[in-house]
Amino acid sequence: MKTSVKVAFGISLVWIIVTLILFLAGFSKQAFVIGIMINLFCLLVSISLALFYTKREKNYDESFFLDDFKIALQGGIVYTLIISGFIYVYHEYIDSSIKDALVQDRVTALHEAYPDEAAYLKLQAVDAKWKDKSFDDFIENQEDQTKGIISSFSVFVFHLMGLFIFAMFFSFFATIIMRKIILRQ
């Protein structure tokens, strides 16, 4: 197995353990934003260590920029795939409280924006899409859309896309820093 893949497995395991410890301690909802920051930091560490250990394994030989970028991106992509898969399993089977709280907040905001049929009639006057629908149909439709947007699968896709973009960004700059500042190539 490649060094970059081993590093990505190890660092992703660290983040998974931290997330499960927070869940078992009962801080999963409170530490949601902190968990995202730790996730991005672990992605950066995974990319940087994958590149560093691979370069050290090859005795710091000079190579092309794209070869180093590819090595860094391998660590980032493997980390992204593992973490995104775990995120799906976590929100679907382990702890749905974060997802449920987000859905409940959106539904509450919907009911505050349209508390009765009078507010809905104003919407019907502006938006032709709802002219033939009743107030209950509108509320049910909006609640279903919210539950569809904030589902385990959509959170998986958002993490996959977001971490992939960050992996490309971090890989590019980690490669530049490794080559220009650390190795002076």
Image (cartoon, rainbow, N blue to C red):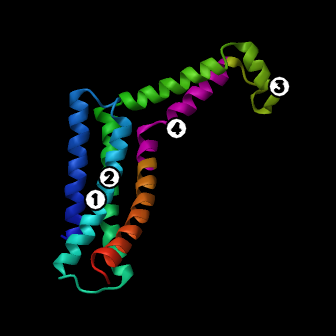
Q: CA distance from mark 3 to mark 4?
A: 26 Å
Q: Which of disc 3 and disc 1 is earlier in sequence?
A: 1
Identify the amino acid type marked 4: Ile
Q: Which residue is mark 1?
A: 45
Which residue was labeled with disc 4? 149
Residue 168 in picture, x, y percent from top left: 42, 65
Q: How far is disc 4 from disc 2 in space, using C-alphas?
A: 26 Å
Query: Of the residues tagged 4 and 2, which is closer to the observer?
Result: 2
- Element type at mark 4: helix
Residue 87 in the figure: left or right of residue 8: right
**Residue toward you, 131 or 60:** 60
Q: Residue at x 46, y 29 (%)?
A: 102
Contact flag, marks 1 and 2 (Cβ < 8 Å): yes
Label 2: which secondary element: helix
Kindly identify the amino acid type of the residue bearing the numbered disc 3.
Ala
Choose the circle earlier in sequence order: 3 or 2. 2
Dominant secondary-structure state across the stretch colored magenta: helix
Q: Which residue is mark 3?
A: 125
The spot of residue 14 in percent (x, y) is 21, 49
Q: Of marks 4 and 2, which one's residue comes earlier in the chain?
A: 2
